Amino acid sequence: GVKKDLCELQGKHQEISSWLAVVRDRALGSGTQLPWVNELRNVAYDIEDLLYGVHLEAEKDKIHSDGDEQTIADYFCAKPKSLLFRCKVASKVKAIKVKYEKIVKHASDANIIRNNLQMDHPARSSNTRTAGEPSMLSNVEDSKI
């Protein structure tokens, strides 16, 4: 449910943020950046905003409760009045997943084209990855998002 999706998004946010830090450092050195990197950065911001909004809503609910400490997961499981909020969160999670999958497909297609061009022209392009360089597409099949 929503709880599981939020946990997955949190992990995906950490992965994307780490990857973007590496790409940013490389782009500063080379002066080039792929267009879908900005889209990926926007997805990271969307995830961050969503997680922050859920945290604020849970804190707001905690203030109105009897003061018991609750985790975000408890908040989603125990508060029927939060059904509308959960539906909104689920909708935002779905939208983020769609954006992410679109970016991954675009990047994958670009990598396929780049690899095919390399086969046609053995000279190495300056845009190609080197061995050991992180790839956002390394675990696309394993990703739940």
Image (cartoon, grey):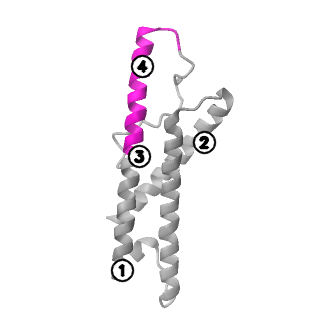
Q: Which residue is mark 4?
A: 115
**Farthest left residue?**
1
Separation of disc 1 and disc 4 at Cα?
Answer: 51 Å
Q: Quadrant of residue 120?
A: top left
Amino acid at circle 4: Asn
Q: Earlier in the sequence, mark 2 or mark 4?
A: 2
Confirm or deny contact between disc 1 and disc 3 (CB under 8 A). no
Mark on residue 21? 2
- Vertical placement of 47 versus 74: above or below? above
Residue at left offset 52%, top offset 9%: 123
Q: Earlier in the sequence, mark 2 or mark 1?
A: 2
Q: Which residues are magenta?
A: 101-124
Amino acid at circle 1: Ala
Residue 69 location, x and y as percent? 50, 81
Residue 49 is left or right of residue 143, and the answer is: right
Mark 2 crowdedness (10 Å alpha carbons): few <14, some 14-19, many ≥20: few
Separation of disc 1 and disc 3 at Cα?
Answer: 30 Å
Please say whether residue 48 is one of the residues in the magenta stretch.
no
Q: Which residue is mark 3?
A: 100
Of residues 111 and 95, the one nearer the viewer is: 95
- Vertical placement of 71 versus 128: above or below? below
Does dot 4 land on a helix, a strand or a loop? Answer: helix
Residue at left offset 40%, top offset 22%: 113
Prevailing secondary structure of the magenta residues: helix
Residue 102 location, x and y as percent? 38, 41
Q: Earlier in the sequence, mark 1 or mark 3?
A: 1
